[in-house]
């Protein structure tokens, strides 16, 4: 059917496990990717994705909607913010992130790089 495309994150085309403490489920749609990230308590980008990305900080842009849990983000310039349920956030490349508390952070990311959490 031309002009419409529907995919479900419940049937991802790709699952990218982090070193541990979560995973990214990805569907490719409309010429881009949408990711559902599940970040378990204790997850931190610099510990659980950096070994895959092989960069000093996360170089993927993010445009996300948080469903549950809380996440802290620190930009390379020192700016910090916190994201929680119902928040929409735009995060530029050059940051670290971590789960706050003992609840998994689940977020839908509409702006993620196609290389996010893929071994380099």
Image (tube, rainbow, N blue to C red):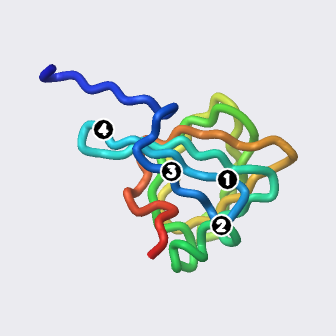
Decide: is 71 above or below 116: above
Mark before the other along the chain sequence, 2 or 4: 2
In the rendered structure, the answer to whether residue 7 lies left or right of residue 67 reads left
* Residue 86 percent coordinates (x, y): 64, 28
Residues marked 1 and 3 touching at CB (< 8 Å): no
Which residue is denoted by mark 2 in the rendering?
A: 19
Decide: is 64 above or below 117: above
The residue shown at (30%, 38%) is 29
Tag of residue 29: 4
Front position among marks 1 and 3: 3
The CA distance from mark 1 to mark 4 is 23 Å
- Secondary structure beneath dot 2 equals loop
- Looking at the rendering, in which quadrant would you find the N terminus? top left
The CA distance from mark 2 to mark 3 is 13 Å
The residue shown at (71%, 37%) is 84
The CA distance from mark 2 to mark 4 is 26 Å
Mark before the other along the chain sequence, 1 or 3: 3
* Residue 114 percent coordinates (x, y): 37, 57
- The tally of labels here is 4
Residue 91 or 2: which is nearer the viewer?
2
Decide: is 24 above or below 10: below
Disc 1: CA contacts within 10 A as few (<14), some (14-19) or many (>=20):
many
Mark before the other along the chain sequence, 1 or 4: 1
Disc 4: CA contacts within 10 A as few (<14), some (14-19) or many (>=20):
few
The CA distance from mark 3 to mark 4 is 15 Å
Which residue is denoted by mark 3 in the rendering?
A: 15
Which residue is denoted by mark 1 in the rendering?
A: 22
* Residue 27 percent coordinates (x, y): 39, 41
- Secondary structure beneath dot 4 equals strand
Mark before the other along the chain sequence, 3 or 4: 3
């Amino acid at each position: 059917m031309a002009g419409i495309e529907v995919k479900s994150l419940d049937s991802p085309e790709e699952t990218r496990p982090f070193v541990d403490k979560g995973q990214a489920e990805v569907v490719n749609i409309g010429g881009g990717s949408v990711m559902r990230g599940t970040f378990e308590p204790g997850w931190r980008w610099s510990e659980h994705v950096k070994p895959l990305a092989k960069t000093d900080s996360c170089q993927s842009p993010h445009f996300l909607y948080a469903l549950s849990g809380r996440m802290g983000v620190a930009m390379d310039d020192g700016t910090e913010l916190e994201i929680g349920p119902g928040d929409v956030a735009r995060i530029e490349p050059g940051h670290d992130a971590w789960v706050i508390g003992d609840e998994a952070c689940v977020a839908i990311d509409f702006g993620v790089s196609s290389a996010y959490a893929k071994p380099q």
